[in-house]
Image (cartoon, helix red, strand yellow):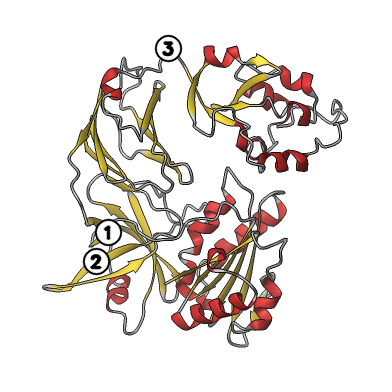
């Protein structure tokens, strides 16, 4: 977090460059001082840490321990000292808010800043907390937030609104019934930090007010639900044989889907004949009014019709108001936080698991990624969301300094299109776009593969020949 300007930068001592700071952050040393356990910090507690050897500050609701960063700060120690012990958001924004402080200080995070006058943790809440779960809450006039610290990576997260003042929250198979002080609106806003298991649920109040308490919480009986009914809201044509389908859960339900996860879609094609197949939930890569507003209580799919695909033909023929059933999210893919680059090999509808992975990589608040997509199709007209991919590619090559995204289209006929190559998957293409594993690069690249089975097998064979191990790549089946 550089709060100095070009006019007041100071000469840093040897060993205190940005790269030295990054190396210190990756050394395993505890720069936060709290052992990696996120805590809630009141303003009075923040004010106590206002010394050079004990320096905390807050920016946009997050509290950082900048004690170790003092000598690395380009604006000098004195400039950084101006903000310690306080909410330094205004100071930071006035000087240069463009700095990616979240990336620079990611290893210094202590927790979140809360206001004593509205932050309370009643005994009834404490009684409902197991040893492996910590729960916080805070509010403003228009919203209420719960923060669940599950302490388990990639927790299962599901919500159901039972009434305007009561909802069930299921985390890793344990359901908690939350009875609220007053009424709220649906849907919720849910954010999950997969690596740490932090789950934040933002509820919007029906009426503006500060509540004396959130209500009460208790552990409820868990009912296993295998499928939820969904109604088709909207349908859009993407290519000549691919549609984008936007469904809404019939009940007020939210199920968190991690990048690369899939669900099973079940439909009764004939009386007594249920058919189910895995589909990857997906959403547009760029903001567009065409697809409407995609909220937490909706789930979207790209569906390609196949001549012999009974379920795909059925889904392709649906109209708004028609119903399907959708399972809970599942899948073994875990996003690489140790890699610097993500390389994707996709063919046809094999793009679908790549879309949320691309979005997640380019919007990560904890890591900067380079993302490359190699995308095979038979013809130009078969390319799914080419306009989306081209726009994203242009944005992240020109506007953004840290994040980088490139796409290379491969077609298997003679169509001529800039940046489109008339090539099938082979060693030459892999050699061109996939770096060989060396001692210095063995942890740099993560590879995702998805397409027809023959494509997947050939890709896997070729990248193994390049020296990649099973920990470096994932094949979506």
Give the foreground label among 1 and 2: 1
| Residue with the mark numbered 2 | 266
Query: Image height check: is 79 above or below 190?
Result: above
Callout 1: SS: strand
Q: Residue at x 22, y 57 (%)?
A: 226
Relative to 115, 256 lies left or right: left
Q: Nearer the viewer, residue 321 or 452?
A: 452
Residue closest to the far bottom: 414
Q: Which is more N-terminal, label 3 or label 1?
A: 3
C-alpha span from label 1 to label 2 = 8 Å
Residue 177 x %, y %? 23, 34
Instruction: Look at 30% across and 38% down and name the residue there.
Output: 186
Q: Position of residue 431 (x, y in %)?
A: 69, 77
Viewer-proximal residue among 50 and 242: 50
Residue 82, by quadrant, is: top right
Q: Secondary structure at mark 2?
A: strand
In this view of the protein, which residue sits in the foreground, 236 or 161?
A: 161
Q: Which residue is mark 1?
A: 327
- Residue at horizontal 51 percent and vertical 58 percent from the top: 357
Residue under label 3: 117
Label 1 packing within 10 angstroms: few (<14), some (14-19), many (20+):
some
Is residue 393 placed above or below 42 in the rendered structure?
below
Left or right: residue 362 compared with residue 457: right
* Cα–Cα gap, marks 3 and 2: 49 Å
């Amino acid at each position: 977090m550089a709060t100095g300007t070009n006019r007041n930068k100071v000469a840093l001592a040897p060993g205190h460059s940005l790269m030295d700071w990054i190396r210190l952050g990756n050394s395993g040393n505890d720069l936060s001082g709290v052992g990696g356990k996120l805590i809630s910090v009141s303003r009075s507690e923040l004010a106590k840490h206002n010394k050079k050897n004990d320096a905390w500050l807050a920016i946009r609701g997050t509290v950082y321990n900048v004690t170790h960063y003092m000598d690395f700060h380009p604006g000098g120690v004195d400039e950084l000292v101006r903000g310690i012990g306080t909410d330094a958001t205004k100071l930071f924004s006035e000087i240069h808010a463009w700095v990616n402080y979240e990336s620079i200080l990611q290893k210094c995070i202590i927790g979140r800043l809360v206001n004593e006058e509205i932050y309370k943790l009643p005994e009834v809440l404490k009684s409902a907390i197991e040893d492996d779960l910590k729960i916080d809450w805070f509010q403003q006039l228009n919203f209420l937030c719960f923060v669940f610290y599950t302490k388990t990576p990639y927790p299962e997260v599901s919500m159901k609104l039972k009434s305007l003042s009561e909802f069930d929250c299921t985390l890793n198979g344990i359901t908690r019934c939350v009875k609220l002080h007053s009424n709220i609106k649906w849907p919720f806003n849910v954010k999950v930090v997969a690596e740490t298991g932090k789950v934040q649920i933002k509820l919007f109040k029906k009426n503006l007010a500060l509540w004396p308490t959130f209500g009460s919480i208790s552990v409820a009986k868990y009912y296993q639900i295998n499928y939820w009914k969904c109604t088709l809201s909207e349908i859009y044509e993407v290519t000549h044989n691919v549609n984008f389908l936007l469904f809404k859960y019939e009940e007020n339900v939210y199920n968190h889907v991690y990048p690369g996860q899939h669900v099973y879609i079940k439909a009764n094609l004939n009386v007594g004949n249920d058919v189910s197949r895995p589909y990857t939930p997906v959403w547009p890569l760029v903001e567009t009014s065409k697809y409407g507003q995609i909220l937490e209580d909706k789930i979207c799919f790209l569906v390609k019709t196949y001549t012999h695909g009974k379920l795909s033909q059925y889904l392709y023929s649906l109209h708004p108001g028609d119903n399907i059933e959708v399972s809970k999210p599942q899948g073994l893919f875990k996003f690489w936080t140790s890699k610097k680059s993500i390389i994707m090999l996709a063919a046809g509808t094999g793009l679908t698991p790549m879309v949320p992975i691309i979005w997640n990589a380019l919007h990560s608040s904890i890591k900067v990624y380079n993302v490359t997509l190699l995308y095979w199709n038979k013809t130009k007209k078969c390319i799914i969301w080419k306009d989306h991919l081209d726009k994203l590619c242009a944005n992240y090559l020109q506007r953004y300094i840290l994040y980088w995204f490139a796409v290379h289209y491969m077609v298997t006929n003679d169509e001529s299109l800039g940046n489109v190559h008339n090539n099938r998957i082979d060693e030459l293409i892999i050699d061109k776009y996939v770096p060989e594993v060396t001692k210095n690069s063995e942890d740099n690249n993560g590879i995702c593969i998805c397409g027809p089975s023959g494509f997947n097998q050939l890709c896997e064979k070729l990248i193994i020949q390049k020296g990649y191990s099973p920990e470096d790549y994932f094949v979506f089946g």
